[in-house]
Image: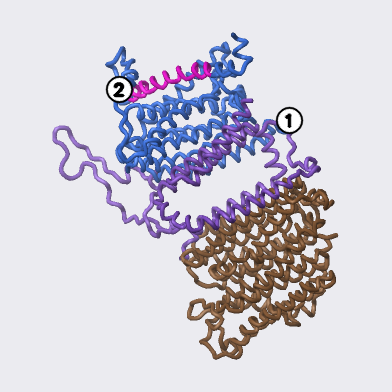
Chain colours: A brown, B blue, C purple
């Protein structure tokens, strides 16, 4: 059975339950302590992930390899950053509750399971655990109408996506006779045996996963939910779950369905192009920075999908590197957004950033770096992420999609640079409130990674390379 | 004739019908006399005589009551939903009857000896709440509705701990078959090693059957008669019969799960035809406890009832379940341990 | 023969009640038809030889879930005429989408063929000598223990979510403290006074409660711990 492979997940869920107990039994507000404990639990899990062997356990339901380890570490880092950020999301009614870090921990368990899924059932359970936690987190500020709306909207649409996914799984099971990735791979090795039902099933599975990474045409929920959810939750939703769902998409398509490349490649290309276009075009008109980030994330997922569509180890490597750079850029940006508070009230308009360079040069510089990086301007990490992906696509002869990617990057650069322009050249708005140390920490850490990635890319690239090879052999 | 009954499909149907008949007629007699027994026992405990006019010692009282009920007019309130209004008592009564299909009164003496007997009983007893809810809603009247809501919450709550109790027993037996459950108690009745579960089960059965001190769904001093306030004549009689048949059913379940069913106490060697007699005797003891409880305890308040179910019984039975499983595992007593 | 007849009977009632669930005017009737549907599904399970699933379906869905459904539907005062207002307007769109889905499914089913190798991959080959229940237990608690535990976590998250989103601390309300009630002795609260025969009890003290010694309800103890922050 080899259950020891799942020790990181087991430890993390036990920690989550222990912190929950601590929170329930402690008198007074346990938010700060349980957040700290949660960060500790995430770090501990990270260490355990690093020391877990590669192998397959639980009768083929669970697999650990370099790929899962890479994804898990990314997820853990993203989750830890979100918890730290939430510490600085001061005094919003109802947000300072110990259940918040606990839910993020349990959500992380779901994502870790997703990273290690080697059966369609494990995949589904992981997704459900992750999604259910996020539904609750999105509605966490329950007295805020927008937050409740976000939670409900996400829940209803998410349930629909789960339904699609399950329907796809059942079709695949019916037509291929198995849910385990190994057996599926063996059964589908001969493309002649592939029936229309099976392809329909794969399409449904891709649709369900595309909802989770908010790729077009399953992106409708994203702007509303991003805007309505409390900002730390938005930051979390924008990073770790995207990584986990993308990992799952990569693992299932490049794993059991790899011999059906011809069947799903066009689909991924189509989704990718649509996401890039919508992400860059629709973001132009936004005045709310959280909505803007929603469209930006849609676009970024589009870029990441190019690497998957290439279907080569180099492409997968590109996706993996892209995801890590994306996590840091996004966390950093959201740390800056959470810091946008005036007289104790959060402000979210882009215009509110006016003249930030004069009132708070540090914050302005950090945000500028993130924006440049998101736009893909060298030497920031965002550029390198795009570089690896586009070069993998070009190596496969997929010129058109690479060109579209570059063009949409240029369009996207417009609205990223517009924020920089507002910060540096517009009239100064009143200064923001002093920001908590936790936000400065997250912003600074992300900033350092984003800026200096080009100096030391080797460890990350090597790890991503090993992970991609573990998947595609 | 024998050949026809046992070897043809039609014969099988007829045989089953005959069996059901042979079980249900005595059962209904028991129900009738349970009402009599209740009044006599309560009378004795309150130092009065109870029914003593109709027949010797009032023995014909149940029949007098039955005739009275039959003669009365069935009133359907004008605002009520007539179909559901009449469906509810039939449902209550019918469920109380069909549960008996799996009860073995002696080794192998059950109409249907199925593999999942306990689950069947549990399923049927969990359906009992529908009779109450539907009657409360269909009456289109305040008090019945309140009674129905109370009852729904109460029965669902207590089913949870009842389920855990059953799982404890199942762990010890290794089967869901009622016959096997009784046979597993040949060395010791489960009421001894599982005594706390036995107590919880008994109290939960009181709540399941809406008996005092958990009779708040009908609590006559607060919501008049609760869910059957609007019922009269035969419709009311059906509820009444159903309630008492359910009491006997729950007593039988207690007997089977904890008191060794038809097995004689202390392993006294008795001929096998004595089985049903032991069974009935044990039932009577449990039923006496039902009546005794009613005579002794005042009615629970609603929040106390919920607290008891969710905050006391549920955690405790869960804990005991883990304990039982742990003990069985540690000492290697698990049935089917492979 | 009888099994086939029973199958068609149950299947027909199942479909009929499913249709009624969506079309019934009264929501309570809808739920009752839903329950009828559950029953027939359970009967179909029985016919397929899955007696454990059949019973669990009745216990869980009919005995618990549908009760709560019914409970909620009865409590809510839903104006269904109002809810159906948009029905006419959106019916054509819905019908078109439905028809297209049906067409697609038809095309898929038209190309239906089981993968020839499918039988080799059967997850749960039936072991003849094991009972249905034991077999399911084996699968759930041994082969799929990971998924079982994950489902547990999902339920835990659901529970946390329900509490986080709905539980409101009522503040310093006086609640019943059972332990204190039980620990209280008669001698602490009552004074027994002899009432001699023939004289009756005097107007003043024959049995009176001791005035409560400035005993304030310990509200903090009962405020839901950890929610003190709001």
Marks 2/1: CA distance?
57 Å
Task: Looking at this view, name the residue that lies furthest to the left.
Answer: C199
The residue lying toward the viewer, choosing from C204 and A9, is A9
Tell me residue C88's x, y (percent): 47, 55
Magenta residues, start to end: B17-44
| Residue bearing mark 2 | B71
- Within 10 Å of disc 1 (Cα), the crowding (few <14, some 14-19, many 20+) is few
Query: Relative to A212, is A284 above or below?
Result: below
Q: Are marks 2 and 1 on the same chain?
A: no
Q: Is residue A141 left or right of residue B179?
A: left
Q: Is residue B52 magenta?
A: no
Mark carried by residue C175: none
- Residue at 74% over, 71% down: A322
Secondary structure character of the magenta stretch overall: helix
Q: Depth-wise, is mark 2 or mark 1 nearer the camera?
A: 2
| Residue A37 position by quadrant | bottom right
| Residue bearing mark 1 | C128
Tell me residue A38's x, y (percent): 62, 63
The residue lying toward the viewer, choosing from B308 and A145, is A145
Tell me residue B283's x, y (percent): 47, 22
């Amino acid at each position: 059975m080899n259950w020891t492979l799942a020790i990181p997940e087991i430890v993390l869920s036990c920690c989550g339950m222990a912190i929950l107990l601590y929170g329930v039994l402690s008198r007074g507000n346990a938010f700060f302590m349980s957040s700290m404990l949660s960060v500790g639990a995430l770090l501990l899990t990270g260490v355990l992930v690093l020391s877990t062997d590669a192998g397959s356990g639980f009768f083929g339901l669970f697999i650990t390899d370099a790929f899962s380890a890479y994804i898990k570490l990314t997820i853990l880092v993203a989750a830890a950053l979100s918890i730290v950020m939430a510490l600085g999301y001061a005094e919003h009614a109802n947000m300072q509750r110990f259940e918040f870090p606990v839910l993020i921990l349990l959500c992380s368990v779901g994502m870790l399971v997703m990273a290690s899924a080697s059966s369609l059932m494990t995949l589904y359970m992981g997704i459900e655990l992750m999604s259910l936690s996020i539904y609750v987190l999105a509605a966490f500020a329950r007295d805020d109408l927008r937050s409740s709306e976000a939670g409900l909207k996400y829940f209803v649409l998410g349930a629909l996506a789960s339904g699609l996914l399950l329907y796809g799984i059942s079709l695949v099971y019916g037509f291929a006779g198995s849910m385990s990735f190994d057996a599926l791979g063996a059964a589908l090795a001969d493309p002649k045996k592939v029936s229309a039902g099976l392809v329909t099933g794969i399409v449904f599975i891709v649709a369900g996963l595309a909802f989770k990474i908010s790729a077009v045409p399953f992106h409708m929920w994203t702007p509303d939910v991003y805007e309505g959810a409390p900002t730390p939750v938005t930051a979390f939703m924008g990073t770790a779950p995207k990584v986990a769902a993308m990992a799952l998409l990569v693992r299932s398509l490049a794993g059991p369905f790899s011999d059906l490349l011809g069947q799903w490649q066009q689909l991924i290309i189509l989704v990718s192009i649509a996401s890039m276009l919508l992400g860059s075009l629709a973001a132009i008109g936004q005045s709310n920075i959280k909505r803007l980030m929603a469209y930006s994330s849609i676009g970024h997922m589009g870029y990441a999908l190019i690497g998957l569509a290439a279907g080569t180890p180099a492409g997968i490597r590109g996706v993996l590197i892209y995801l890590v750079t994306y996590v840091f850029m996004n966390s950093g940006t959201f740390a800056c957004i959470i810091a946008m508070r005036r007289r104790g009230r959060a402000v979210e308009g882009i215009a509110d950033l006016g003249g930030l360079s004069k009132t708070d040069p540090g914050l302005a510089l950090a945000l500028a770096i993130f924006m440049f990086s998101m736009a893909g301007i060298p030497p920031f990490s965002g550029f390198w992420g795009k570089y690896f992906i586009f070069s993998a696509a070009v190596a496969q002869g997929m010129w058109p999609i690479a060109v579209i990617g570059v063009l949409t990057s240029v369009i996207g650069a417009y609205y990223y640079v517009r924020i920089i322009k507002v910060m540096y050249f517009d009239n100064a708005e009143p200064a923001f409130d002093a920001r908590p140390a936790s936000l400065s920490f997250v912003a600074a850490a992300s900033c350092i990674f984003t800026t200096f990635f080009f100096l030391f890319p080797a460890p990350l690239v090597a790890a991503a390379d090993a992970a991609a090879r573990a998947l595609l052999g | 004739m024998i050949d026809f009954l046992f070897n043809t499909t039609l014969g099988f149907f007829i045989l089953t019908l005959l069996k059901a008949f042979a079980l249900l007629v005595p059962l209904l007699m028991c129900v009738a006399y349970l009402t009599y027994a209740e009044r006599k026992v309560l009378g004795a405990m309150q130092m009065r005589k109870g029914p003593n006019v109709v027949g010797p010692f009032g023995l014909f009282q149940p029949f007098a009551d039955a005739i009275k009920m039959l003669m009365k007019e069935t009133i359907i309130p004008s605002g009520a939903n007539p179909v559901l209004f009449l469906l509810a008592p039939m449902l209550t009564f019918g469920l109380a009857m069909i549960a008996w299909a799996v009860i073995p009164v002696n080794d192998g003496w059950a109409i249907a000896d199925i593999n999942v007997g306990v689950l069947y009983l549990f399923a049927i007893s969990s359906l009992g709440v529908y009779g109450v809810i539907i009657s409360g809603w269909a009456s289109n009247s305040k008090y019945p509705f309140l009674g129905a809501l109370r009852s729904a919450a109460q029965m669902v709550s207590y089913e949870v701990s009842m389920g855990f109790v059953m799982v404890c027993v199942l762990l010890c037996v290794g089967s869901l078959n009622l016959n096997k459950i009784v046979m597993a108690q040949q060395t010791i009745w489960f009421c001894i090693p599982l005594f706390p579960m036995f107590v919880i089960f008994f109290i939960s059965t009181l709540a399941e059957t809406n008996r005092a001190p958990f009779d708040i769904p009908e609590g006559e001093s607060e919501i008049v008669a609760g869910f059957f306030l609007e019922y009269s004549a035969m419709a009311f009689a059906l509820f009444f019969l159903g309630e008492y048949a359910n009491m006997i059913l729950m007593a039988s379940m207690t007997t089977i799960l904890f008191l060794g069913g038809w097995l004689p106490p202390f392993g006294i060697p008795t001929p096998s035809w004595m089985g049903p007699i032991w069974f009935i005797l044990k039932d009577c003891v449990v039923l006496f406890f039902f009546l005794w409880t009613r005579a002794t305890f005042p009615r629970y308040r609603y929040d106390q009832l919920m607290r008891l179910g969710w905050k006391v019984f549920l955690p405790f039975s869960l804990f005991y379940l883990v304990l039982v499983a742990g003990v069985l595992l540690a000492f290697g007593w698990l049935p089917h341990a492979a | 023969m009888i099994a086939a007849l029973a199958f068609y009977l149950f299947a027909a009632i199942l479909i009929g009640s499913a249709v009624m669930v969506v079309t019934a005017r009264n929501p309570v009737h809808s739920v009752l038809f839903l329950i009828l549907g559950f029953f027939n599904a359970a009967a179909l399970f029985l016919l397929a030889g899955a007696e454990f699933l059949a019973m669990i379906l009745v216990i869980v869905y009919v005995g618990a879930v549908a009760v709560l459904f019914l409970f909620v539907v009865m409590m809510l005062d839903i104006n269904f005429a109002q809810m159906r207002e948009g029905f006419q307007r959106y019916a054509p769109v819905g019908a078109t989408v439905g028809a297209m889905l049906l067409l697609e499914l038809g095309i898929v089913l038209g190309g239906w063929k089981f993968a020839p190798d499918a039988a080799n991959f059967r997850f749960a080959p039936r072991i003849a000598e094991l009972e249905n229940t034991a077999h399911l237990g084996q699968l759930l608690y041994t082969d799929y223990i990971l998924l079982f535990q994950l489902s547990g976590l999902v339920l835990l998250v659901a529970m946390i979510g329900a509490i986080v989103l709905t539980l409101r601390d009522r503040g310093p309300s006086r609640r019943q403290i059972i332990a204190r009630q039980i620990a209280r002795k008669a001698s602490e609260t009552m004074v027994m006074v002899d009432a001699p025969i023939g004289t009756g009890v005097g107007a003043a003290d024959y049995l009176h409660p001791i005035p409560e010694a400035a005993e304030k309800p310990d509200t903090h103890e009962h405020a839901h711990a950890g929610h003190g922050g709001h």
